[in-house]
Amino acid sequence: MRLERPSMKWKEEHAAYRNEWDEDRMIPSSFNWDEGIPYETYLEELALREAGHGKWLPCTNYFLVDDTQRVVGMIDIRHDLNEYLHQVGGHIGYGIRPSERRKGYATWMLSEALKVTDTLGISSVLITCNEDNVGSAKTIQKNGGIEDGSFTEEDGTVVRRFWIKKD
Ligand SMILES: CC(C)(COP(=O)(O)OP(=O)(O)OC[C@H]1O[C@@H](n2cnc3c(N)ncnc32)[C@H](O)[C@@H]1OP(=O)(O)O)[C@@H](O)C(=O)NCCC(=O)NCCS
């Protein structure tokens, strides 16, 4: 298992992952893309997002790749928080390919991402999940997340907020 930066090498694997995804929107949302956009364009857009273009704060994205060279997860590490991220999004967003869930991959991927936040000098990492997302809450808690106050979005969605302190 390893984290790999998105690149042309993963074009076919990315398409397979995208086809398998069962939700409307990709999670994390930095990986979201419209059907029909060429992968090359998608990589360019991802690079702009990582640089902090438009509504995006600077971030670093990785694919989680298994030993058979299959992309099984995606993770987005935001270098800072704005008001929205402080309330709802947190520093790190992630998703695991549907067929690969419940194998410990999200837990491991988050632990690797926490090494990256160390290198970025982020001493308190905020990670959030919707209150009905038991799997994500467990993933965060298994990585040392301590629950803070929740936030309720306009549509009534309750977002649980956890801090992982690195001091
Ligand atoms: C949430 C998600 C990332 C979990 O990924 P995963 O690889 O299945 O998680 P793990 O295998 O590391 O499991 C972590 C813990 O959660 C539990 N878990 C995972 N999915 C669960 C579910 N649907 N219901 C109950 N528990 C669940 C696991 O059993 C494990 O706990 P345990 O060690 O006590 O058994 C994955 O379901 C996903 O991609 N969902 C859609 C995107 C998403 O919600 N991302 C998070 C946004 S906050």
Image (cartoon, helix red, strand yellow):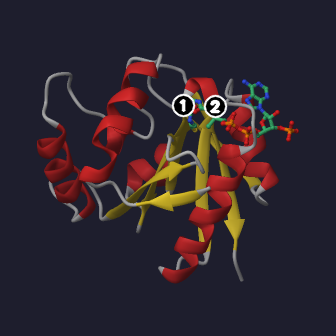
> How many marks are shown on the rendered structure?
2
Task: Tell me the quarter of the picture where residue 33 sits.
Answer: top left
Q: Is mark 1 within 8 Å of ligand 1?
A: yes
Q: Secondary structure at mark 1?
A: loop
- Residue 40 is labelled as none
Ligand 1's image quarter is: top right
Task: Tell me the quarter of the picture where residue 151 sits.
Answer: top right
Position of residue 116 relative to residue 144, above or below, is below
Q: Secondary structure at mark 2?
A: helix
Amino acid type of the residue tagged 2 in the rendering = Glu
Q: In the rendered view, does 94 fall on the left or right side of 104?
A: left
Q: Is mark 2 within 8 Å of ligand 1?
A: yes
- Sort mark 2 into few (<14), some (14-19) or many (20+) by Cα contacts within 10 Å: few
Nearest the viewer among 81 and 2 is: 2
Nearest the viewer among 154 and 118 is: 118
At which x and y percent is residue 122?
54, 76
Position of residue 91 relative to residue 167, above or below, is above
Amino acid type of the residue tagged 1 in the rendering = Arg
Nearest the viewer among 82 and 29 is: 29
| Residue with the mark numbered 1 | 97
| Residue with the mark numbered 2 | 100
Contact, CB < 8 Å: mark 2 with mark 1?
A: yes
